[in-house]
Image: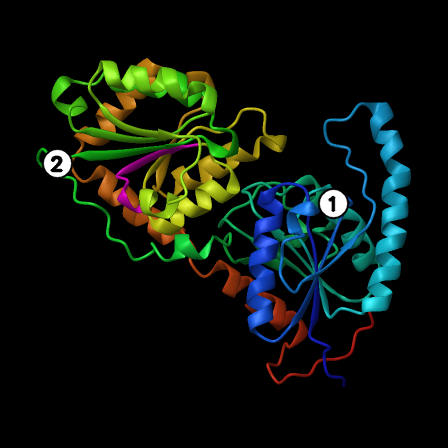
Amino acid sequence: MSTPSNLIALAAGGTGGHVFPASALACEMTTRGWQVVFITDRRGGAVSNMENIQTYRVRAGGVAGKSLLGRLRSIPELAIGTLQARRLLKRLSPDVVVGFGGYASVPTMMAATWGTCHTAIHEQNAVLGRANRLFARKVDKIAMSYATCRAVPPEAASKIVQTGMPVRSDIIAMRDSAYPQLDGGAAINLMVIGGSQGARVFSDVVPHAIAGLPDALRRRIRVVQQCRKEDLSCVRDAYGAMNVAAELADFFSDMPDRLAAAHLVISRSGASSVAEILAVGRPSILVPYPHAVDDHQSANAHAVAEVGAGWMMDQSIFTSENLTERLSELLGAEGLLTRAALHARRAGFADAAHRLADMVEMLVLPNGNGHHEGRAAA
């Protein structure tokens, strides 16, 4: 029997969707007395601002979207990175290595699963990502954000633990905010979130859809919309022409408060956006980005729709006419949005980081007594 060193290595990099849940777990594990290290690739500047977290970089070669020649050129990078990660893990001897997807995590997870340390992966979307798919059969546990997830190998199903997707603390603070009353002639707060790049399609479609609503309904609409900077002027003019009150910006620093005040959210269905909407408990119309890898945004939107927390509209049918019809249906049906808000709250996880940390500790401390059978690192 041996005492754990209380060291966890997190493999993450690339987009914020991979990095944020890793940083959330890092914060939670730190509060529990663990030492945490990040292992990323050479581009991993996104994690460099993590206070008191040692960051290591290894080489990694992504293949998604590359030509055959590009993929072949990535192989040496991946091989070198895996050897670097193997040496690093042997030196650090972590108790657990957790991967968060993205090609930046591949060398570290490959080295970890070749060794004998405890391993886990976290999937942010409702379809298992390509990097995580490589290790689903080999890791000890698979943490899921949704109750269902596509592309999970059948033999790995017993490893699944639904932890949810970690969200920011200021979002969690809005968890208990009541759904705004929606009755009589009260104002209807519509929030439009374009994602990190302020989807152009929302700027084109949403104002015209609102213009098509019956006068009595349109006069009640209050819009908060995230737009690209180059779209702000024309969108502002469109709302002004129909006398609809609208607050427009390319970024809202008070996003949690805006979400809490919304009766309905129109959004892309990236992992972070959906997790925040559900955590606050707001109904949504989700328009998946059509070019997302493995169409994971469609999978996320389907998962939300299946539990009655929102509605999915493919971008191919996301026209002003169709959106006008959908808004008329949702805003005109008594109690429909209120029920969807309840389902959204039930589907959201305010304690995802805590659940994820619990799963990690159960790997290392299965008896809850601070001891486990010693397992050497890779």
- Residue 81 placed where, x, y %? 85, 48
Q: Residue at x 79, y 59 (%)?
A: 112
Q: Secondary structure at mark 2?
A: loop
Give the numbered dot on residue 186.
2
Residue 145 locus on image (x, y percent):
52, 50
Quarter containing the C terminus:
bottom right
For this rendering, which residue is in front, 237 or 362? 237
Amino acid at circle 2: Ala
Compared across the picture, whether 152 is left or right of 82 comes to left
- The residue type indicated by label 1 comes to Ala
Find residue 24 and report its horizontal and vertical position in percent.
55, 58
Identify the residue shown where x is 56% and y is 52%. Answer: 144
Does the residue at mark 2 contact the one at mark 1 (Cβ under 8 Å)? Answer: no
Left/right of residue 4 with respect to residue 366 in the rendered view = right
Q: Which residues are magenta?
A: 260-267
Residue 190 magenta-highlighted: no
Image-based side of 157 in relation to 262, left or right: right
Crowd band around label 1 with a 10 angstrom C-alpha radius: few (<14), some (14–19), many (20+): many
- Quarter holding residue 181: top left
Residue 161 found in image quarter: bottom right
Position of 55 compared to 175: left or right?
right
What residue lies at 51% left-to-right and 52% top-to-bottom?
A: 165
Residue that badge 1 annotates = 104
Q: Could you tell me if residue 318 is visible in this image? A: no
User: First in sequence: mark 2 or mark 1?
Assistant: 1
Q: Label 2 crowding class (10 Å Cα cut-off): few <14, some 14-19, many 20+?
A: few
Q: Looking at the picture, does residue 374 appear above or below residue 209?
A: below
Give the alpha-carbon distance from disc 2 to disc 1, as whole Å.
Answer: 49 Å
Element at label 1? helix
Colouring method of the image: rainbow
